[in-house]
Image (tube, rainbow, N blue to C red):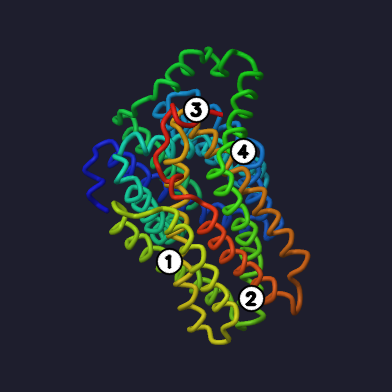
């Protein structure tokens, strides 16, 4: 897996990601704590998370379209610098009266990030060879897991020692370092995308009209609908996102009412999943060169579902922790595989909009799952609804195994996929 770091461009991108993601986790821990400690209101704290989530519904698909029309390296650099500048606005927040600034920054940070992520995901296939793509995505997942373990602890320490201003400066600096490293990368452009870039006006909206962006967005949707492999992949992951939404809401209820635990036990479950995810990612990295993404997607989903089912029917906390760790390994398998499949099955000039559309669809379906959990998951229905979520994971894996053809794993070129 580490051999992929011999590719200088990808190595720089990976290191930049570790630095900026660590800064993100520092802020993710510190900012909600600041809001809650300033207001004592769970509603006010929840509003911050809503502000952070809304851009995925409003901006996600359009951001992907524009990423396909812009230079990806430049897009990532501008996104990093913009997020660093936005963070500095938080230095003006010193009291509860500054909460509006917090919400605006949370919304804007998330919106700008929606330009960075599709650009990054779309750029990776241009930086590594085909046979190393699975390993590269596994290494990305490993870095996310490592920063998830380190970042929150660092965020708590910096918040305690230096307060919100210290956290802001640290996260802003992480974005600037990331921008510098990305500026050293040469990301090749495909012929189709270079032609689109030449058509971009000074304000960056293609032909200078909203119509051009709308047309490109529709092209992305038509691409997904026309390619059976992509449509099935979107459908499979869509069902999984509903299950994910259900579990994310009811896990706390399960820990409290079924396992009779509290915040500490909930943290143990998160850590167990994180450790399982790291182990699963390392395993994928070892087989990445010869792996078949559809197989690992399918069996990863099946394993995740069965592990969740076992965990939700466990009456002993330690037994449940073991099953949650297994679920974490399964999650690593299907998440890395589905990203690899999207990169391989979509031509370069469409990758940004497909990733953007995928993220927006996932956000909508997660919210659907959360709504179902909130409406149906009370009282004795908690374990039943969680069991349904586990079954959704497993059946999605079976559907992927049956419906997704191996030919879809072949890498797409600009000449092979046209809406």
Badge 3 crowding class, 10 Å Cα cut-off, few under 14, some 14 to 19, many 20 or more, is: many
Is 339 displayed left or right of 60 in the figure?
A: left
Which numbered tag is attached to residue 68? 3
Asked if disc 3 and disc 1 are in contact, CB closer than 8 Å, the reply is: no
Foreground label between 3 and 4: 4
Q: Earlier in the sequence, mark 1 or mark 2?
A: 2
Q: Nearer the viewer, residue 182 or 57?
A: 57
Foreground label between 1 and 2: 1
Q: Which residue is mark 1?
A: 329
Q: Earlier in the sequence, mark 2 or mark 3?
A: 3
Q: Earlier in the sequence, mark 1 or mark 4?
A: 4
Distance (Cα) linking label 1 and label 2: 21 Å
Foreground label between 2 and 3: 3
Foreground label between 1 and 4: 4
- Image coordinates for residue 234, horizontal then vertical, percent: 58, 47
Q: Which residue is mark 4?
A: 225
Is 3 displayed left or right of 311 in the figure?
A: left
Asked if disc 2 and disc 3 are in contact, CB closer than 8 Å, the reply is: no
Distance (Cα) linking label 3 and label 4: 19 Å
Distance (Cα) linking label 3 and label 1: 33 Å
Q: Residue at x 51, y 13 (%)?
A: 199
Q: Earlier in the sequence, mark 3 or mark 1?
A: 3
Badge 2 crowding class, 10 Å Cα cut-off, few under 14, some 14 to 19, many 20 or more, is: some
Q: Residue furthest bottom?
A: 316
Q: Nearer the viewer, residue 417 or 313?
A: 417
Is 57 displayed left or right of 152 in the figure?
A: right
Q: Residue at x 67, y 48 (%)?
A: 364
Q: Which residue is mark 2?
A: 254
- Image coordinates for residue 274, horizontal then vertical, percent: 44, 65
Badge 1 crowding class, 10 Å Cα cut-off, few under 14, some 14 to 19, many 20 or more, is: many
């Amino acid at each position: 897996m580490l051999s992929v770091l011999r590719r200088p461009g990808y190595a720089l991108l990976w290191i930049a990601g570790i630095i900026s993601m660590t800064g993100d986790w520092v802020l993710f821990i510190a900012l909600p704590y600041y809001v809650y400690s300033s207001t004592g209101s769970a509603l006010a704290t929840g509003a911050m998370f809503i502000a952070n989530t809304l851009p995925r519904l409003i901006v996600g698909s359009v951001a992907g379209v524009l990423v396909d029309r812009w230079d990806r390296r430049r897009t990532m650099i501008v996104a990093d610098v913009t997020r660093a500048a936005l963070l500095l606005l938080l230095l003006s927040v010193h009291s509860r009266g500054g909460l509006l600034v917090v919400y605006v920054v949370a919304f804007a940070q998330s919106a700008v990030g929606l330009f960075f992520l599709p650009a990054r995901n779309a750029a990776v296939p241009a930086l590594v060879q085909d046979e190393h793509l699975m390993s590269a995505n596994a290494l990305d997942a490993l870095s996310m897991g490592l920063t998830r373990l380190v970042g929150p602890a660092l965020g708590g320490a910096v918040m305690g020692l230096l307060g919100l201003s210290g956290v802001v400066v640290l996260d802003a600096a992480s974005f600037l370092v990331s921008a510098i490293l990305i500026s050293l990368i040469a990301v090749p452009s495909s012929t189709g995308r270079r032609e689109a870039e030449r058509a971009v006006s000074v304000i960056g909206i293609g032909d200078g009209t909203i119509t051009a962006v709308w047309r490109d967005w529709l092209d992305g949707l038509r691409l997904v609908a026309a390619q059976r492999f992509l449509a099935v992949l979107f459908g499979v992951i869509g069902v999984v996102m509903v299950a994910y939404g259900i579990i994310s809401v009811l896990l706390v209820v399960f820990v409290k009412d079924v396992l009779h635990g509290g915040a500490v036990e909930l943290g143990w479950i998160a850590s167990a999943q994180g450790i399982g995810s790291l182990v699963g990612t390392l395993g994928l990295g070892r087989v990445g060169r010869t792996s078949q993404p559809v197989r690992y997607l399918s069996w990863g989903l099946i394993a995740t579902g069965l592990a969740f089912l076992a965990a939700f029917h466990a009456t002993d906390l330690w037994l449940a922790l073991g099953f949650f760790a297994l679920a974490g390994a399964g999650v690593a398998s299907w998440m890395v595989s589905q990203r690899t499949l999207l990169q391989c099955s979509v031509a370069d000039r469409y990758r940004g909009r497909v990733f953007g559309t995928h993220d927006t669809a996932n956000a909508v379906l997660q919210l659907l799952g959360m709504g179902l959990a909130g409406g149906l998951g009370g009282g004795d229905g908690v374990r039943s609804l969680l069991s349904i979520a586990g079954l959704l994971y497993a059946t999605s894996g079976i559907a992927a195994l049956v419906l997704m053809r191996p030919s879809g794993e072949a890498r797409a070129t600009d000449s092979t996929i046209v809406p």
